[in-house]
Image (cartoon, rainbow, N blue to C red):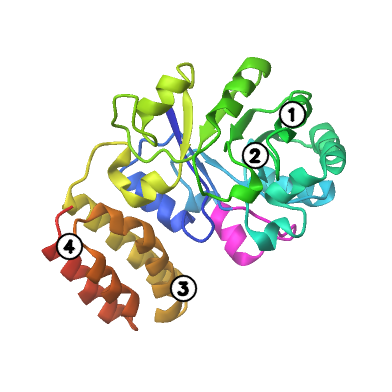
Amino acid sequence: MKYYLAPMEGITTYNFRRAYHKYYGGVEKYFTPFIGNRKLNSRERNDILPEHNEGMNVVPQILANRPEDFLSIADVAASYGYPTVNLNLGCPSGTVTARKRGAGFLSVPEELERFLDEIFDKGRLRISVKTRIGVEDMEEWGRLLELFGRYPMEELIIHPRLLREGYGGRVHIETFEAAVGCLRIPLCYNGDIISLDGDGTEYGTMGWLISRLPDVDTVMVGRGILQRPGFLTGDHSADTLRAFHDEILEGYIQIMSGDTNTLYKMKELWTFMIQSFENSERYLKKIRKAGSVSEYRIAVDSIFRECNV
């Protein structure tokens, strides 16, 4: 089984990826948070600089609905030596989809078809796609499958939910089964896998996924890794988790300007990582209330000292 780290805006930055690769690993590919600016701002450029991603198989993800924008960003990736880029057709954020980007692009299949025609015709790099199964109705998936099947994609990563569903409710696993039955391109499953355990009956476990998709061999994981970083390797020790956390913190202290920006990044990470600790709700409140890095360190010391991992 191959595992990918899902791109999560503002969280799975190169600072996070480097620390994760050092202390845990087990990831076949790391996908960057999306790049949506054809000129690339400093944050986007820093995230894909080769020297910031040494030793990792990193795939830059592009958010675009104009071929010229996609191709321009892909050319920058090519100049840095990347062989593959990924097209984001999965982001459900309202600010993204309102502009017909991310999963919002699925609402205009004719425009999407013209876009795909051009980027696959003119692109210099291999292209993979991360998609949802439609916008409002499950019946949209059949047309999208027919469309995707026309192109020489390196890979199709499927999150089996509609745009309108966000991240709520169960995934529509049958739509992935339909893709297995009609597409010849490599497929990757994405959505709600938070545990490697299970006997096949518990939703959200690898056992459940394999019981439904016995031939699946590639899975993209996001929340499962953020909630329990030892998800893939089985290393759930407090010492490893603390070293991982501290490296991310020190990295952001060096990168960000001032405590406020550093704390914003770390507090966002804790909305997930708190799941690694037992009976930790009141400690999370202390972390969220921290107004300086020194106060934050005290709150973190408390949770590692007083809560079981």
Q: Give x and y (percent) for residue 143.
A: 77, 29
- Please say if the residues under marks 2 and 1 sit with CB atoms less than 8 Å apart: yes
Viewer-side residue, 34 vs 93: 93
1 or 4: tag closer to the N-terminus:
1
Viewer-side residue, 18 vs 36: 36
Element on which disc 2 rests = strand
Q: Which residue is mark 4?
A: 304
Viewer-side residue, 285 vs 56: 285
Q: Nearer the viewer, mark 2 or mark 4?
A: 2
Element on which disc 1 rests = helix
User: Whole-Å distance between the Cαs marked 2 and 1?
Assistant: 10 Å
Q: Is residue 44 magenta?
A: yes
Element on which disc 4 rests = helix
User: How many C-alpha atoms fall within 10 Å of the one at disc 3: few (<14), some, or many (≥20)?
Assistant: few
Q: Give x and y (percent) for residue 164.
A: 64, 50
Q: Which residue is mark 1?
A: 148
Relative side of 222 to 102, left or right: left
Element on which disc 3 rests = loop
Residue stretch in magenta: 34-48
1 or 3: tag closer to the N-terminus:
1
At a point 38% along the width and 27% down the height, the residue shown is 208
Q: Give x and y (percent) for residue 125.
A: 71, 35
**Disc assigned to residue 131:** 2
2 or 4: tag closer to the N-terminus:
2
Relative side of 25 to 65, left or right: left
4 or 3: tag closer to the N-terminus:
3
